[in-house]
Image (cartoon, helix red, strand yellow):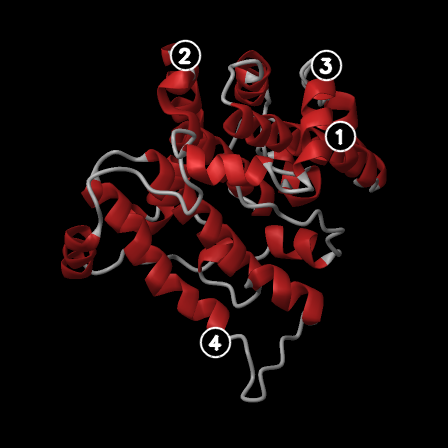
Amino acid sequence: MKAHAILVLTAISAVFASAPVAAAQPPDAARIEQIAGWLGDGTYSPTPRIDDRAFWTSVGQSGRFADVAREAAAESKRSPAALPDDLYLEYSRNGNRSRYEAVYFRKLKAYRVLVIAECVENKGRFLEPIQRVITSYAADKTWVLPAHDSGLENFEGRNITIDLFSSEVACDLATTDHLLGQQLSESTRALLRKEVRRRVFDPYEHAVKDGRSRIGWITTTNNWNAVCLANVTGAALALLDRREERAFYVASAEKYIASFLSGFTADGYCSEGVGYWNYGF
């Protein structure tokens, strides 16, 4: 599973989250059909499924896995990190984003550790803790960070938007479904799919297909475009069964990544700096 850096995002995120948004346009239907012809019948992730024992055995034999195994064993005894309302509201009340984000990213890291450990061991001892975290994510009011939730629209349930990390959570959950498959309970898989659909796929499709929602990063030139497109497309490839539906996400990513690339000057300069350049790519 792809590891993501935990970044301290600057105030540009909050400004961007509330900026006017241009309407997106759907990708060309002929291009979607062409891409569908190239895709396989099944879901896809660059990380092999748990039943690829040669791959996961090699991961387990690496020197770094011992720490992962110990951490997973400890996490399996804990409840998923709680994200209470008061912590979420701190940003809107006093501008503090760090306390909520510390818990948010701790929960995400613990989840990844559990999934990796289960894929390596293949003994089932981490399946229940993994499913507890999935259930916890389904119960969260929003996966969007407080600093990106302009006017508390997501928190109060008035709108569902997609930010850097709600898309990342969706990609991680979708990848889990792809990696573990039927080792997860049917009810857990159904819940996971429902929530990724509701929180990411539906608002994305409404923005691109019919303009019923507006998502600023689809047409922006900063790294939100690249990061969110990668996460949303990765989630679609890992989770959606219909080839034509997956092709829509690939085609739209191909279309809108041009916005990110247009933000670079002729000498390759990125106005956000080297760290953001790296995160975007």
Residue plotted at (69% across, 42% down): 63
Compute the Cα span from label 2 to label 1.
27 Å
In the displayed structure image, the side of residue 35 where residue 270 appears, left or right? right
In the displayed structure image, the side of residue 110 where residue 170 appears, left or right? left
Front: mark 1 or 4? 1
Front: mark 4 or 2? 2
In the displayed structure image, the side of residue 63 where residue 208 appears, left or right? left
In the displayed structure image, the side of residue 183 where residue 95 appears, left or right? right
Between 136 and 206, the one lying in front of the other is: 136
Kind of residue at badge 3: Arg
Can residue 81 be seen here? The reply is: no
Identify whether 31 is placed above or below 36: below
Compute the Cα span from label 1 to label 4.
35 Å
| Rendered location of residue 238, percent (x, y) | 37, 38
Q: Earlier in the sequence, mark 1 or mark 4?
A: 1
Is the C-beta separation of discs 3 and 4 under 8 Å?
Answer: no
Is the C-beta separation of discs 4 and 2 under 8 Å?
Answer: no
Kind of residue at badge 1: Val
Which class describes the residues within 10 Å of circle 1: few (<14), some (14-19), or many (20+)? some
Q: Earlier in the sequence, mark 4 or mark 2?
A: 2
Identify whether 266 is placed above or below 6: below
- Residue occupied by mark 1: 103
- Residue occupied by mark 3: 78
Between 264 and 71, the one lying in front of the other is: 71
- Residue occupied by mark 4: 262
Identify whether 64 is placed above or below 157: below
